[in-house]
Every structure is written in C-alpha cells, then in structure tokens.
C-alpha cells in the first residue's frame, strides 16, 4: 500500500519497550493525560475538533495541539446546526423559532475518538465532539446527541442495539460545473467504467490504487472495513462496516465518508454519496442491519431460547412498519433522495418485510438465532448516519414499547405496484411532523429544527428551473 504524505515526511517512531498501549493505540484514549502523551508521541502539531451538523457535514475548529491539551473552551454558534445544505436559514413556523440570541454551543471532546488525519501533509489529529449549552445542558437537537438519546432509551429497558451499516457511493469524474451531468471515471484500463459490474472483482481492480488508499487511511484511523465490493452502477462501490455500538458505528460512517472523499480527490476524481447522482444508474443506499441484545445476558432478544423468533422480533418489525413512513425524511433527507425511491427499482417503496427478500423495505437475512437481525433497506447514502440510525432504532423501539404486531411476511416481489412511502420531500416532512410519538422520542427541539430545515431546502429547490422543464415546456405549453 502507498504511504501517506505524513509518513514520507517523518518516519513513524520506533516502538520502545515500555511504551504504554494507549500511546500506540490507533484510535482513542481515556483521559487528558493519555491524550497529551498520545499527541506528543506522534509529534502532532494541529488537531481538528469536529462534529456533524444536520447534513452530516464536519463542522468545527482547528487548533494547535498544545492549546487542545490545555482543555481550552471551544464553541460554535448554535446557528451552525440550523442551516440548510445551501447555507440558508429556515423561517420561523411549525414549532420552530430561531433563537434571538444566536448563542454559542460548547464543543466537548470525546477522547475515545481521537485519531490521526492520515491525508494531511503535516502531523494532524482529529477528535469528535459533543455539543452542550454554556450551562452544561445537552444540546438535544444536534445529531450525535439525538442518537445518544435513542440509545439511552433502550438502556432504560436494559437493552442495547447492535447495528451494521452498508454504505454505497459513486466515483465520478471531477465536475466543477454543476450544469453538466456527472460521468463515470476512467479506471486503470483507460476506459470509462460501465454499469452491470455488481460484485465484479475486475470492477474493483479498476481502482486498485484508490482503494489501497481507502484501506490505508482507514487503518491509520483505527477504522475497520468488513468488505468492499463493486455495485451495479458505473463506478459504484459499497463498503460494509463490522457490527457494533450505534454511536461508534455512526462515528465510523461519518469518518469513512470524509476518508473516501479525500482518497478520491487524491486520485483526481470525486466520491459522491448523492442518492441518485447519475440518470439511468442505480441509486446509492445506506442499508442498516439491526439487532437488540439484553445488556445483562448479551443474548439477542429477537430469538427465544429454542432459537425460534421472539415476540420482541415481531414487535420491532411492527414498529418499523408503522413509523418508518413518518421517519422517511431522516432516511431520505433531500429532493434528490426521492429519485432513488421509485417503483420497480432496487430501492423499496413499501413497508413490507420478508425473509431474504430484497424487494421489501425490511429484510430478514438468513442467519443463526444469535445473529437474527432486521435490515432496513430504505435509507439512502446521503442520509446523516447519526440521524438515520436514530430514526431506524426509534421506530423499532416504539414497536417494542407498544407491542405492535407486523403484517405477515411476503415471499413475492412487492416493489412494483403499491407505493407506501411519500414520493417527495415535502410530503415526508408533513408526515414526520404528525407523528407525536416519534418526535417525542427523538426530541421536540430536534424535530422542529430538522423539519424547518427540510422545508426551507424544498422551497429553495423549487426556485430552480430544470433542463426537463426547458426541454418539454418551453415551446409546447
């Protein structure tokens, strides 16, 4: 594998006998003393203190490592977490009120996420941060805190969710002018990549050097990729992450997106997580595998002692069937997301469930009883991983609490005729705002803020006149 610019500039220090294990750890320390030694051992000069905004974009501040270990107070304006993807701010209404003081939120570093930034030329580290008000109260409308809130609700019942995301994305040629459509990249063969390459090893090998960098960057950050495949689309890849704690996996997905984009730029192309970046090609999903374990016993509550399916298994699916349409705006958060969710395509437009049935929204893969899980196939890869996981787990939790029974499983293709999901962003926002149980579980301050952002993004999109309108309406109506 190629080495990073940092390694070229300064060889890694030899591991001396007696060096504490936490200093050599690729990812995370327990306290500020360990952080200081970890940074010093790597001669880290700068550190990025980052956190995901509502879109999953990394926001934060960079500072010298010496200032960081002095535990300096860092803050971001609360407005950062109320901004649309285009940089605008929503209007008041539907329960949302823009704070008049536009006060700051404090960044609180989660030292368990401390790691290097392997694509930087100077020795640089990064750490994920949570957000609190100046008096220490949790800023409940920020994405990482929304997911923590849902996980805490499971903990109150003695339960712990286990998740495994699968993230699809496209590699495309650089596209500095947004008026032009995206096109597939040129691989090592010298030809533009075509479609129909699902699970093709040759398709993956077209991007050997780039994929080597993705693996190398990931390893340097202590991120573990389970598998990587070429998907059906032209230049479309998928990375599967190993199952684990929802917050840790959301952190990894967030950091993987940064990593993949940086690796692609190094090879003079873009990596995009748009749900439908290229007309005529498949959309990109973020499938979420979910199971729930008893915290005391560690056993999967979806299975009985004899290996049969438990009541909890059915209730979890029932909750998802009832609430997933209302949570769709968190799985499909942009106008473009709904171009992927179309009938007779690989993405579901239903809330059916079935065993190993990829036309259903909720697929139950074949597995042994301890690995029994439910795969949510609705989320698109443009979704904020913290919010997609929070919404999916929240829907299942409402099913567990309210003992909701699902429909019977289906064994046929169900993605052709009946559409059970909103077909557009504004419809999804309206449904979200009507589900009081879901909003209460996620937090009212988040729900009103997120809905306001999505309404504003929809209105901004409606100001744009598309090529389709000019082609078919200009001279014909």
Image (spheres, rainbow, N blue to C red):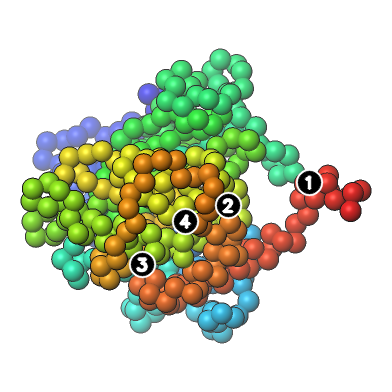
Residue 338 marker = 2
Q: Kindly report the distance in space between the C-alpha atoms of the residues bearing marks 1 and 2.
A: 18 Å
Number of residue marks: 4
**Which sits in the foreground, 327 or 168?**
327
Q: Nearer the viewer, residue 28 or 86?
A: 86
Label 4 packing within 10 angstroms: few (<14), some (14-19), many (20+): many
Q: Image point 32% across, 59% down: which residue?
A: 406
Q: Which residue is mark 1?
A: 467
User: Is any atom of residue 37 visible in this view?
Assistant: yes
Q: Earlier in the sequence, mark 4 or mark 1?
A: 4
Q: In screen coordinates, is 242 left or right of 144?
A: left
Tell whether label 1 touches label 4 (CB within 8 Å).
no
Q: Quadrant of residue 365?
A: top left
| Residue 69 visible in image | no
Estimate how packed mark 1 is, as few (under 14), some (14 to 19) or many (20 or more) residues with alpha carbons within 10 Å.
few
What is the secondary structure assignment of the residue under circle 1?
A: helix
The tag on residue 331 is 4
Check disc 2: other Cα within 10 Å, few if <14, some if 14-19, many if 20+: many
Q: CA distance from mark 1 to mark 3?
A: 40 Å
Q: Position of residue 281 (x, y in %)?
A: 59, 35
Q: Residue furthest bottom?
A: 100
Q: Check the image and name the residue furthest to the top.
A: 189
Badge nearest the viewer, 1 or 3: 1
C-alpha span from label 4 to label 1: 27 Å
Residue at 28 percent across and 59 percent down: it is 316
Contact, CB < 8 Å: mark 1 with mark 2? no
Of pointers 4 and 2, the one earlier in the residue sequence: 4
């Amino acid at each position: 594998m190629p080495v990073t610019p940092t390694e070229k500039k300064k060889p890694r220090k030899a591991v001396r006998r007696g060096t504490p294990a936490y200093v050599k750890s690729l990812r995370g320390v327990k306290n500020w003393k360990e952080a200081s030694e970890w940074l010093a051992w790597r001669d880290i000069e700068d550190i990025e203190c980052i956190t995901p905004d509502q879109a999953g974009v990394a926001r934060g501040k960079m500072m010298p490592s010496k200032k960081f270990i002095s535990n300096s107070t860092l803050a971001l304006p609360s407005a950062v977490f109320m901004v649309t993807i285009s940089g605008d701010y929503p209007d008041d209404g539907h329960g949302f009120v823009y704070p008049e003081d536009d006060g700051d939120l404090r960044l609180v570093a989660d030292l368990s996420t401390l790691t290097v930034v392997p694509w930087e030329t100077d020795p640089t580290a990064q750490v994920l941060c949570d957000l609190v008000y100046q008096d220490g109260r949790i800023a409940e409308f920020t994405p990482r805190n929304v997911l923590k809130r849902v996980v805490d609700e499971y903990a109150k019942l003695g339960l712990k969710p286990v998740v495994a995301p699968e993230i699809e994305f496209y590699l495309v040629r650089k596209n500095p002018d947004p008026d032009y459509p995206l096109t597939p990249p040129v691989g090592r063969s010298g030809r533009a990549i075509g479609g129909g390459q699902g699970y093709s090893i040759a398709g993956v090998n077209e991007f050997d050097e780039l994929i080597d960098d993705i693996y190398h960057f990931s390893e340097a950050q202590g991120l573990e990729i389970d598998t990587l495949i070429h998907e059906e689309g032209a230049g479309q890849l998928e990375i599967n992450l190993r199952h684990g704690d929802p917050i840790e996996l959301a952190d990894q997905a967030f950091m993987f997106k940064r990593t993949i984009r940086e690796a692609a730029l190094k090879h003079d192309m873009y990596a995009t997580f748009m749900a439908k970046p290229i007309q005529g090609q498949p959309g990109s999903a973020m499938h979420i595998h979910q199971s729930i374990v008893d915290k005391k016993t560690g056993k999967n509550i979806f299975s009985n002692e004899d290996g049969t399916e438990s009541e909890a298994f059915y209730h979890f699916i029932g909750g998802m069937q009832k609430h997933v349409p209302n949570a769709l705006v968190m799985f499909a958060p942009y106008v473009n997301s709904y171009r992927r969710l179309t009938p007779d395509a690989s993405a579901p437009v239903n809330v059916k469930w079935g065993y190993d049935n990829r036309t259903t929204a909720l697929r139950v893969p074949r597995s042994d009883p301890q690995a029994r899980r439910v795969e949510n196939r609705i989320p698109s890869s443009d979704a904020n991983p913290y919010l997609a996981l929070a919404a999916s787990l929240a829907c299942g939790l409402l099913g567990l609490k309210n003992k909701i029974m699902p429909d019977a499983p289906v064994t046929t293709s169900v993605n052709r005729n009946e559409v059970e999901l909103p077909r557009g962003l504004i419809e999804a926002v309206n449904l979200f705002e009507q589900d009081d149980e879901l909003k209460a579980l996620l937090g009212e301050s988040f729900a009103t803020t997120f809905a306001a952002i999505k309404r504003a993004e929809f209105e901004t999109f409606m100001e744009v006149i598309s090529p389709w309108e000019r082609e078919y309406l200009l001279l014909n109506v």
